[in-house]
């Protein structure tokens, strides 16, 4: 594939993905919440007579527990929705794992499949919501240790340089985006790491304890990674795959620069 053809493929894929909004993820999460509420209602309806017979106080306690569980999910999703849409940091509690996303996202994925929505579209929507939440929390992002995680598939497949051990092994020949990204890292004082899987990525994060992460990956890996490293703020950049998944992938440099500018303005 020549350079002009490659350029068209990348720009078309980026434009297609950019047209997708935060709506699918938020919609299916709210739908998931309604289903959870319905399941809770059915369960309580079935066990209520026996519990009341056993002890009215136990029945009341179980009912309150069900309502409390629903209230936590509802309030969490409400705050996530408002924060991602209006850009005002309403997330609470700070620096805690999101129980709401952890519980509702798998249900949302299943529902999207029932509605014949591509899982990657929903994951791309999740990444957009996450980036909006990260931007909204800019006032709470302190420190200058920014880690950039790159997928190994950005490296051209005919290259024999081992860059997962040390990204400086890249000779910056220009045949793949890695060299340009390494140069960007040097210019902006960023730590660049190339990883070949989620396990290595988690290991790098645990070793470096970054204040923020710029992650380039496919929709699936970004979605899993963002949830794995929470509450570290992550700015996700979805890669482009003109040759298919996991081989000679590309990245829109303007999106990476947007992520760098976001973190650097918070120093």
Image (tube, helix red, strand yellow):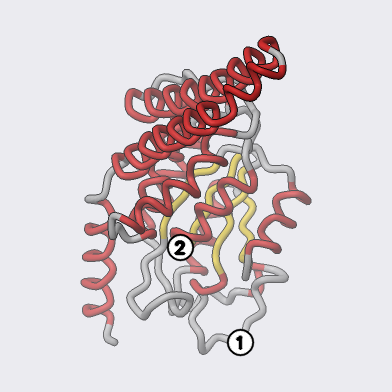
Rendered location of residue 35, percent (x, y): 42, 37
Which structural element holds mark 2?
A: loop
Image point (33%, 28%), residue name: 85
Which of the labelled discs sits on residue 218, or is there none?
2
Q: Tell us which disc is closer to us: 2 or 1.
A: 2
- Depth check: 250 or 17 in front? 17
Rendered location of residue 153, percent (x, y): 51, 74
- Depth check: 48 or 138 in front? 48
Which quarter of the figure is the N terminus placed in?
bottom left
- In this view, the residue farthest toward the right is 207
Q: Which residue is mark 1?
A: 160
Image point (48%, 81%), residue name: 156
Evaluate whether residue 72 shows in this view: yes
Which quarter of the figure is the C terminus placed in?
top right
60 to 264, vertically: above or below? above
For this view, does 77 lie left or right of residue 59? left
For this view, does 154 lie left or right of residue 113? right
Rendered location of residue 84, percent (x, y): 38, 30
* Disc with the residue nearer the chain's start (2 vs 1): 1
84 to 228, vertically: above or below? above
Alpha-carbon distance for marks 2 and 1?
Answer: 23 Å
- Depth check: 249 or 170 in front? 249
For this view, does 144 lie left or right of residue 214? right
37 to 206, vertically: above or below? above
For this view, does 72 lie left or right of residue 27? right
40 to 114, vertically: above or below? above
Which structural element holds mark 1?
A: loop
Which of the labelled discs sits on residue 123, or is there none?
none
């Amino acid at each position: 594939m020549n350079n002009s053809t490659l350029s068209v493929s990348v720009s078309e894929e980026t434009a297609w993905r950019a047209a997708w909004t935060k709506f699918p993820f938020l919609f299916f999460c709210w739908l998931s919440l309604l289903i959870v509420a319905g399941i809770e209602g059915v369960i309580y309806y079935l066990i209520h007579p026996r519990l009341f017979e056993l002890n009215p106080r136990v029945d009341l306690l179980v009912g309150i527990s069900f309502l409390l569980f629903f209230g936590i999910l509802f309030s969490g999703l409400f705050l996530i929705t408002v924060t991602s849409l209006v850009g005002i940091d309403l997330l609470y509690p700070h620096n805690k794992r999101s129980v709401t996303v952890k519980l509702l996202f798998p249900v949302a994925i299943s529902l999207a499949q029932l509605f014949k929505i591509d899982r990657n579209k929903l994951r791309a929507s999740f990444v957009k919501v996450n980036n909006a939440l990260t931007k909204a929390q800019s006032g709470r992002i302190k420190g200058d240790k920014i880690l950039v995680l790159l997928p190994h598939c950005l490296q051209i497949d005919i290259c024999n340089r081992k860059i997962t051990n040390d990204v400086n092994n890249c000779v910056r020949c220009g045949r793949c985006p890695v060299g340009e990204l390494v140069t960007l890292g040097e210019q902006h004082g960023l730590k660049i790491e190339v990883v070949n899987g989620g396990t290595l990525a988690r290991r790098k994060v645990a070793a470096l304890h970054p204040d923020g992460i710029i992650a380039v990956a496919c929709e699936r890996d970004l979605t899993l990674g963002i949830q794995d490293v929470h509450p570290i703020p992550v700015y996700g950049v979805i890669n482009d795959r003109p040759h298919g998944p996991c081989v000679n992938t590309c990245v829109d440099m303007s999106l990476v620069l947007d992520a760098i500018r976001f973190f650097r303005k918070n120093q």
